[in-house]
Image (cartoon, helix red, strand yellow):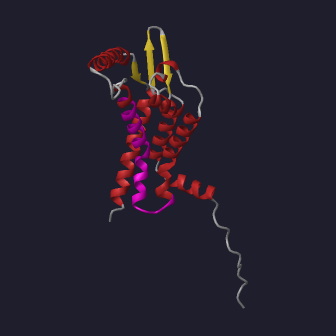
């Protein structure tokens, strides 16, 4: 006579169990890269401002405020909903490399590029915001009005050149950029490996 069989169906894995399994599948280089990005974005200054003995830093999760208003680089950031939302976007980009370990598709490996895309996009937006014209001439402005606006823009551009010498990329920016490059390389390697 056959032994009785257990007909109990194992419970479906919870989302947390799936997430834990995905984390275990990530290689160690990618784990260290994610950790480096996390530290660089949330705990170390991405931009530093030095004016004489005054030193002020800005972390990456505050960069959305600086993109909206570049003067925030010098005067600090207040707590806002925009800051919270950008922090959530940053965390989503940090968790994006879990996607190919959760969804088994080749295209999911491109999620490893998310931190680098966010970092480069924010840098480009901040650069374009601070290097463009600050004042625009109204549609009905005459020659005198246009000359005044051009003069004001030239004055601001010269001033921003002086100010830009006092703003530099901090250790958090370098740490996050290096981690993002490592993740991007790992993701592209896996993307090409799963091509066949």
Q: Is residue 58 above or below residue 90?
A: above
Q: Is residue 119 shown above or below 184?
A: above
* Residue at horizontal 54 percent and vertical 52 percent from the top: 23
Q: Is residue 147 above or below residue 42?
A: above
**Residue at image location 56% in from the left, 57% down from the top:** 21
Image position, residue 32 (x, y; %)? 47, 41
Q: Magenta-highlighted stretch: main secondary structure?
A: helix
Who is closer to the viewer here, 155 or 83? 155
93 on left or right of 147: right
Image-based side of 146 in relation to 42, left or right: left
Residue reaching furthest left?
Answer: 143
Please tell me which residue lies in front, 134 or 190. 134
Asked if the magenta segment contains residue 35, the reply would be: no
User: What span is in magenta?
Assistant: 102-127
User: How far across and how far down the image is residue 195, in percent?
Assistant: 33, 62
Check the picture and name the quadrant holding the N terminus: bottom right
Q: Quadrant of residue 182?
A: top left
For the C terminus, give its image quadrant.
Answer: bottom left
Residue 158, image quadrant: top left
**Residue at the extreme top:** 52
Q: Residue 188's x, y, as percent?
A: 35, 52
Q: Is residue 81 left or right of residue 163?
A: right
- Seen at 37% across and 26% down, the residue is 130
Image location (x, y in percent) of residue 161 = 33, 17
Q: Quadrant of residue 43?
A: top right
- Residue depicted at x 44% and y 35%: 176
Question: How many numbered dots are placed on residues in this image?
Answer: 0
Closer-to-camera residue (72/33): 72
């Amino acid at each position: 006579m056959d032994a009785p069989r257990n007909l109990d169906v194992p419970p479906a894995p919870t989302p947390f169990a799936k997430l834990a399994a995905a984390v275990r599948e990530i290689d160690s280089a990618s784990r260290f890269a994610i950790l480096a990005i996390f530290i660089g974005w949330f705990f170390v200054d991405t931009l530093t401002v030095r004016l004489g003995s005054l030193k002020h830093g800005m972390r990456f999760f505050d960069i959305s405020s600086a993109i909206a208003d570049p003067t925030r680089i010098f005067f600090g950031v207040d707590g806002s909903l925009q800051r919270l939302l950008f922090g959530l976007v940053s965390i989503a980009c940090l968790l994006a490399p879990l996607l190919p370990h959760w969804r088994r598709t080749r295209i999911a490996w491109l999620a490893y590029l998310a931190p680098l895309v966010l970092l480069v996009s924010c840098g480009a937006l901040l650069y374009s915001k601070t290097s463009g014209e600050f004042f625009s001439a109204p549609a009905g402005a005459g020659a005198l009005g246009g000359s005044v606006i051009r003069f004001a823009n030239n004055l601001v551009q010269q001033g921003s050149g002086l100010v830009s010498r006092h703003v530099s990329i901090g250790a958090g920016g370098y740490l996050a950029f290096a981690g993002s490059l490592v993740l991007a390389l790992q993701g592209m390697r896996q993307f090409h490996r799963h091509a066949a």
